[in-house]
Amino acid sequence: MAKKNRLTVFILIAMILGVITGWLVHENSSTDFVKKFSDNIKLLTTIFLRLVQMIIAPLVFCTLVVGIAKLGDLKTVGRVGGKALLWFISASLVSLLLGLFLVNLFQPGHAIDLSNADTAGAKDLIGKTQEFSLARFVEHVFPKSVIEAMANNEILQIVVFSVFFGIAATALHEYAKPLVKALDAASHIILKMVGYVMWFAPVGVFGAIAAVIATKGLHVFSFYGQYLLYFLVGIVLLWLILLFVGFLILRNRVSHLLRRIAQPLLIAFSTTSSEAVFPKLTEELERFGCGEKIVAFVLPLGYSFNLDGSMMYMTFARIAIAQAYGIHMDLATQLTMLLVLMLTSKGIAGVPRAALVVVLATCSMFKIPPEGVALILPIDHFCDMFRTMTNVVGNALATSVVSKWEGALEHTTYNQYKN
């Protein structure tokens, strides 16, 4: 069995063992023990995520600068960036509108039981949230210190600095070549590190699944089955839309792409962090045949501007909370909310449940009680698993499509694909 297949099998086994372990603890232990068990077992996930996070900032910086420099000139940078943004904006609008349509069609808020609200979890989230304002949005986008941005893994701020740095390096031509070559070597060293870190993924997956099942138990699905079902209908429809558009451009290579990114999808699904698979996704897209410079340029941008699953969920969750409280929102208000979410959602890929933080940050603008997030917190982890996986699919498709548009998508044989 190939190493890649072995790791995928280990991750699946870890998910199953996590469910069984979590259920046994939940059913046979006191509340105090469950809390201690959950806090301790989550440390396994924390270790894995921190191992990944330690290489995110240098990898984004190195690959993005090298990608821009290798594009050759500012005209090419603008052309590729324009094509990427065209996909990102279109996919984001489709995702937001799909969430808007489904939440009005199914009315999932009416299925939420007010007695099951997780008020303690909501208070934790509210403590991390600030009300949206234009000033805070600007501060979130533009770094005052690249060192601070890297220390905090602020992907969007790192992208902004890297774009300026890459454009400056491109403008200097030959003078900057030694530095670009050094950064290129550094990016390959970091990608080699990815292979080592990924072998800890099954342990991290086990910790994440066991912790949430031990805390919530399997019965959470009976309380929130209808809400989760309607959301999964939206996820399926969004996948169908994305894959259909991808098929129109990539043709039968879409199925090869999905097989190539199967392992990153599993890790994203089980850890609920897109950031956890960024290095591995970079590697797999290059093996799929995407141009190295396109991957280096488009994928980091996608992590800031192209979070399709999270975008759909933000409209779905916000209006569902309003429905649970009996708050009527007319179409004009909902469309305004959609545009606000379009702005406030940028750069949230790295943090589990970050979509809820964005929802909280803009609640007061539309007279929705922020503590209403407590209503959907019990089921949110399971929703987050699916929306994170969708974010990864969306960014893989975006990078592949831009590579195809730029004539930089190589044909890989089946034997190459298996390696």
Image: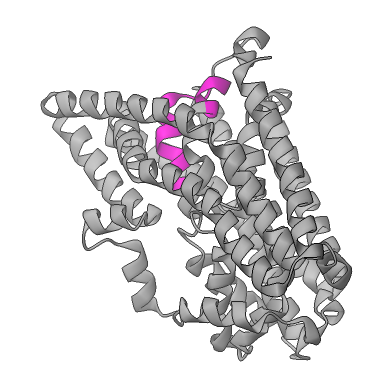
Q: Is residue 288 magenta?
A: yes
Residue 375 falls in which quadrant of the image? bottom right
Name above or below for residue 387 compared with residue 35. Answer: above
**Residue 173 visible in the snapshot:** yes
Residue beneath the point at 64% across and 75% down? 335
Residue beneath the point at 48% across and 32% down? 282
Quadrant housing the N terminus: top right
Q: Please give left or right for residue 388 compared with residue 243 in the image.
A: left
Residue beneath the point at 49% across and 67% down? 343
Name above or below for residue 94 compared with residue 140. Answer: above
Q: How many marks?
A: 0
Name above or below for residue 345 compared with residue 250. Answer: below
Spot occupied by residue 157 in the image (x, y as percentages of width and height)? 33, 56
Q: Is residue 337 magenta?
A: no
Q: Residue furthest left?
A: 175
Residue 288 falls in which quadrant of the image? top right
| Dominant SS in magenta | helix
What stretch of residues is rendered in magenta? 284-302
For the rendered model, the colour scheme is one colour
Spot occupied by residue 407 in the image (x, y as percentages of width and height)? 51, 22
